[in-house]
Image: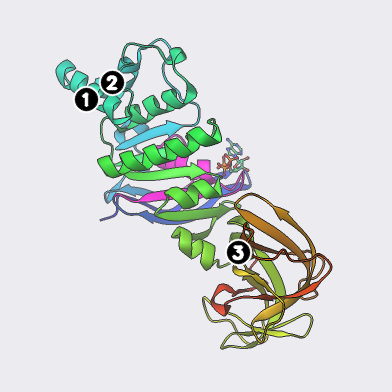
Amino acid sequence: MSTLETQGLGKTYGDFVALAPTDITVEKGEFLTLLGPSGSGKTTLLSLIAGLSEADSGRILMDGKDVTYAAPYQRDIGMMFQNYALFPHMTIAENIAFPLKMRKTSAAESARLVKEALEMVRLPHIADRYPKELSGGQQQRVALARCTIYRPSVILMDEPLGALDKKLRDQMQFEILRIHKEIGGTIVYVTHDQEEAMTMSDRICLMNHGRIAQLGTPADLYFRPQSIFVADFLGEANLINGRLVSEAGMVRLNDGSEIRVSLPRPIAQGTEVKVMLRPQNLRLAETANSDSISGKLISSSVTGASTKFFLDAPALGDKPLIATRATGLSEAAPEPGRDYRLTFDPRDAVAIPASEAA
Ligand code: ATP
């Protein structure tokens, strides 16, 4: 049985649809991330699950039980937000023990669980301090200890690392994953950081305009996007216009050349498509026999671990084509102004119907 299920769950504000009727099933122990641009409905969905706002349509089931109209504290849910939301007048131990107090846990059991929770988040010596005496990262660890101490079956996290700097965020991502493994609950996590979503999630629910654009594993979304929005949102993508001339996967580009592509699902012959090619899957070559696009090198830049090449490609139109490769001195530097062939494996060239923008 799944831990959490929404059936046709929707929310409107006046005429505005913040969340169109949405069906999601989250399995026990799963780490599901709601990802999407600002205003796409992530927080709306999370608040409905938490019971912080009321749905206009649909149902929420937890372990098969209808909790659509249950108060937040009646749902078996823990919550963690971007602003640490610790009680300033309580010590750290009192903060962490708060959910236990609400559940009338005995003082001895509570003390034991708080000690264990502080060890779990690697802050064993701060029980008697107050929140203002801790750094942002430490406060967020305490918030993590507080929302997991009573082992809720579902933990909801809304941009919990949004206020931390990059290095601390990386560390905390690792900590959250470690603790998730240790306690084994189901996590629904909201972020608009695609790298964070790819790193942490079992599955990603990518949202756009209050709807699910695609729900799947990070690899599904990255390698097999079902719309141009998904291809563009996750990582960098070259999107090349063409027409499918064979249902076996042959696309004619605007410059008249033909390339082999892969079709994640059947597309009718004659359909206008965009072929997605990730920059790291394009290699610059002097000559090529097949599966290549031509382009003139405009410029290159070393971005650190990879070097980025910008090419003028007749097949692409006015946007430059981007290719990357690992930065190193073993290969000769390509020369700006020269014509190259950009070769690729057809499995990495994914055709998406051009009409499926959303
Ligand atoms: P962000 O990443 O910026 O937090 P989000 O994906 O979480 O965005 P939501 O907060 O779910 O987006 O908002 C979805 C849409 O619903 C937005 O356009 C927002 O303006 C609108 N909205 C949210 N709450 C209300 C409200 N109380 N009244 C009216 N409109 C609202």
Q: Quadrant of the N terminus?
A: bottom left
Q: Earlier in the sequence, mark 3 or mark 1?
A: 1
Q: Are marks 3 and 2 in contact (CB under 8 Å)?
A: no
| SS at circle 2 | helix
| SS at circle 1 | helix
Q: Give the image location of residue 51, x and y in percent.
A: 41, 37
Residue drawn at (31%, 15%) of the image = 127
Q: Give the image location of residue 297, x and y in percent.
A: 79, 67
Question: The residue under label 2 is which amino acid type?
Answer: Ala
Which stretch appears magenta? 29-56
Residue that label 3 marks = 280
The answer to whether residue 358 is visible is no
Cα–Cα gap, marks 3 and 2: 49 Å
Against 178, is 322 above or below?
below
Q: Give the image location of residue 305, x and y in percent.
A: 59, 52
Marking on residue 113: 1
| Res 228 → quadrant | bottom right
Q: Quadrant of the C terminus?
A: bottom right
Between label 2 and label 1, give the one nearer the viewer: 1
Residue that label 2 marks = 97
